Image (tube, rainbow, N blue to C red):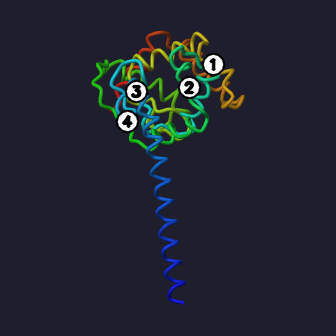
Amino acid sequence: MRKSMTYALAAGALMGFVSLSSAQAADASASMLADTCNGCHGPDGVSQGPAAPTIAGMNKFYLVESMKAYKAGTNRKSSIMQRIAKGYTDSEVEAIAGYFSAKKFGRVAMQNTDAGAASKGQAIAKDLCESCHEKEGYAAEDYPVLAGQMMPYLKNNLMDFKSGDRSIDNNPNMSDKEKRKKKRALEDLMAKHGDDGMAAVLNFYASRK
């Protein structure tokens, strides 16, 4: 009886060791895959430069959807990201997204923003952007974090939406209702507030600490 219990305990310990080793190996693999992203997106996915967004702390599903969209080249166009995304399998994309979503969103870069424009942009964003980009752009549950992203990156994306290079209509992850809502918000931004209003919104989100 005692010998049987000893074997059972030894087997349980071995299974625990194997399970722990597998988890550690998965973490190591995700970390290794993610290392290739840090060159552009900054250490641990916290951007230090103007053109690449911080991806630490983003919603995992959003990161997976983004990588797949770049890979397909249908609704998000980027010569660099498309080439990079094509180099990963779906399971590797999942691992990378899981790794960065578990990190803390960082706002480390110093940005020069206009306080007056940011104040104006806050009112516009509350009217047109808040229903999706909740909590003044800090929320990451359903949409990407905007608060504290680099202003050139935010501007480039807004320009891509405006030009159609980033297509709302071709986004398979949005319902028809979401598409109409986002397109209406962008149209209202331009029609009611023009380029100055767009600059104000960019200043507002970039000024968030």
In this rendered view, identify the residue nearer to me: 209 or 64.
64
Mark 1 residue type: Gly
Work out which residue is located at the far bottom of the displayed protein and give it. Answer: 1
Which of the 4 image quarters holds residue 39?
A: top left
In the picture of the structure, the residue carrying the numbered disc 2 is 87
Instruction: Specify few, some or many for label 1: CA neighbours under 10 Å numbering under 14, 14-19, or 20 or more.
Output: some
Amino acid type at mark 2:
Gly
Q: Is residue 4 visible?
A: yes
Measured as percent of width and height from the top left, residue 97 is found at 51, 37
> In whole angstroms, how far apart are the C-alphas of marks 3 and 2?
17 Å
Left/right placement of residue 200 relative to residue 108 reads right
* Of marks 3 and 2, the one in the foreground: 2
The dot on residue 191 is none
Query: Image height check: is 148 above or below 192?
Result: below
Tell me if 140 is positioned left or right of 147 in this view. Answer: right
Spatial CA span between label 1 and label 4: 26 Å
Q: Are marks 1 and 4 in contact (CB under 8 Å)?
A: no
To which residue does mark 4 refer? 44
Residue beneath the point at 53% across and 17% down: 189
The image shows residue 10, relative to residue 16, as above or below, that is: below
Q: Disc 1 to disc 3, how far (Cα)? A: 20 Å
Q: Earlier in the sequence, mark 4 or mark 2?
A: 4
Of residue 10 and residue 127, the one placed in the foreground of this image is 10
Identify the residue under disc 1.
73
**N-term-proximal mark, 1 vs 2:** 1
Q: State the residue position of label 3.
A: 41
Nearer mark to the viewer, of 1 and 2 = 2
Q: Split into 4 quadrants, where in the image is the C terminus?
A: top left
- Categorize mark 2 by other alpha carbons within 10 Å: few (<14), some (14-19), many (20+): few
